[in-house]
Image (cartoon, rainbow, N blue to C red):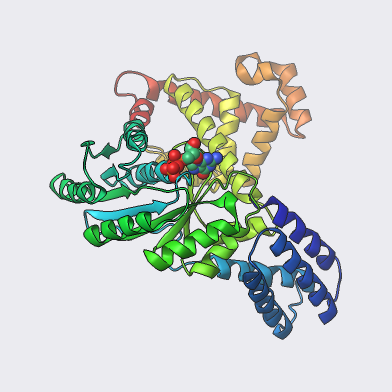
Amino acid sequence: MFENLSERLSGVFDRLTKQGALSDEDVKTALREVRVALLEADVSLPVARDFVNAVQEKATGQAVTKSITPGQQVVKIVHDALIDVLKGEGEPGALKIDNAPAPILMVGLQGSGKTTTTAKLAKRLKDRDGKRVLMASLDVNRPAAMEQLAILGMQIGVDTLPIVKGETPVQIAKRTKTQASLGGYDVYMLDTAGRLSIDEELMAQVEQVRDIVSPRETLLVVDGLTGQDAVQTAENFNTRIGISGVVLTRMDGDGRGGAALSMRAVTGKPIKFVGLGEKMDALETFEPERVAGRILGMGDIVALVEKAQETIEAEQAERMMKRMAKGMFNMNDLKMQLEQMLKMGGMQGMMGMMPGMGKMAKQISDAGLDDKILKQQIALINSMTKKERANPALLQASRKKRIAKGAGMEVSDVNKLMKMQRQMSDMMKKMGKGKGGMMKAAMKQ
Ligand code: GDP
């Protein structure tokens, strides 16, 4: 979502970071370009100007740290300044919803993604925070909008207030409030009507509803693709209604991202969430640190890699648990186990964590097995063929010799590894057997 801005900025900083010493002139030139990049990304002029001035001030007074280049230092200052511009108080995405039932008022223009966001947020509150949520649509002019919320509610397993034809928004709001108390809900969310543009009738209606329910949070949903218009909308709603935060939708699109930067500076209200797609789980907390990283073109690579790793590991572990439950344990399983052990602080740490294996942990430590040995064992397995790994019974003398040689070790080491695999396999079989099998029990948990 910030591609254009980040490309421009990283271009500017690439030139800076390559230079050893940095003159005032360099900083000035770079910051001029930063300003242009911000404006091109649709950041408003006063915000861009203030931002550049703040960076300039900080950069001038800074003592240069030896371990980093002056260019890197400027990048860091810009990074921190971006976070300052984006940050609200408290945790990202935190909502004041502790006193049940807590009302959340959802406001915004028609088509901004308000109804979708209401449901996404309700799902998040239910799934992540274990809250009981009740939703209601106040859009009496558009029955389709009320139906839409009801359908979404069914999809995500969140209750919606039954629709009663002919009620006014105020009546619906009152009924929701009562129902939320009687029904023991933690949170109730009111999806107010939207208009294509801000008009008096809309504002007056939202105001009335606000006065009746005294919302703990009033969240404005705005379309992130509309750039400066989004900021203008936010300012209008904030002046008239008073909002507690903003949800920027369609940030999965190729908008210029400038709206995010101007939003907080102009309205003084934090962006709490971003919508990243049409699906019900495409809502993320707005995290200034991450976004600042993204804007600077350092990308979200770290987060991405971490996430990928997590899923791969979880899948592997599940597959292994299933095999183990069946009493299957070949060299591939052993290799995976060994690699896991390396990651989790060696065999001792790993065994100590598994139920019933404390004793084995001690034996391993007594035998002096450490990371180096783990690595050697992995090397031995790597030197086996696919068939050998899947079926260790194939490992006769000549194969053992070849494997040992391939890993730069002795045949006796291969024997030790095989013994280990056999022992583990026996243990898995024992544990997997019968209804009371330990692995099965563990999997059920
Ligand atoms: P409302 O009129 O403000 O209630 O808008 P809706 O919730 O009905 O959303 C309008 C359209 O925008 C729907 O097709 C949504 O699926 C879509 N939409 C909402 N949020 C996002 C988002 O974050 N990304 C994308 N790509 N589409 C979204």
Q: Quadrant of residue 149?
A: top left
- Residue sitting at x 30%, y 38%: 158
Is residue 293 among the parts visible in the rendering? Answer: yes
**Residue 366 at least partly seen:** no
Residue lying at 21% horizontally and 43% vertically, measured from the top left? 167
- The quadrant of the rendering that contains the C terminus is top left
126 lies left or right of 65: left
Say if 109 sits above or below 332 in the image. Answer: below
- Relative vertical location of residue 412 with respect to residue 397 in this rendering, above or below: below
On the image, the x and y values in percent for residue 428 come to 44, 25
Residue 404 location in percent, x, y? 74, 28
In the rendered view, does 265 fall on the left or right side of 212? Answer: right
Specify the farthest residue to the bottom.
61
Q: Position of residue 81 (x, y in %)?
A: 62, 71
Near-viewer residue (336 or 146): 146
Q: Quadrant of residue 7?
A: bottom right
Depth check: give the residue in front, 8 or 169. Answer: 169
**Figure label count:** 0
| Image location (x, y in percent) of residue 260 | 57, 59
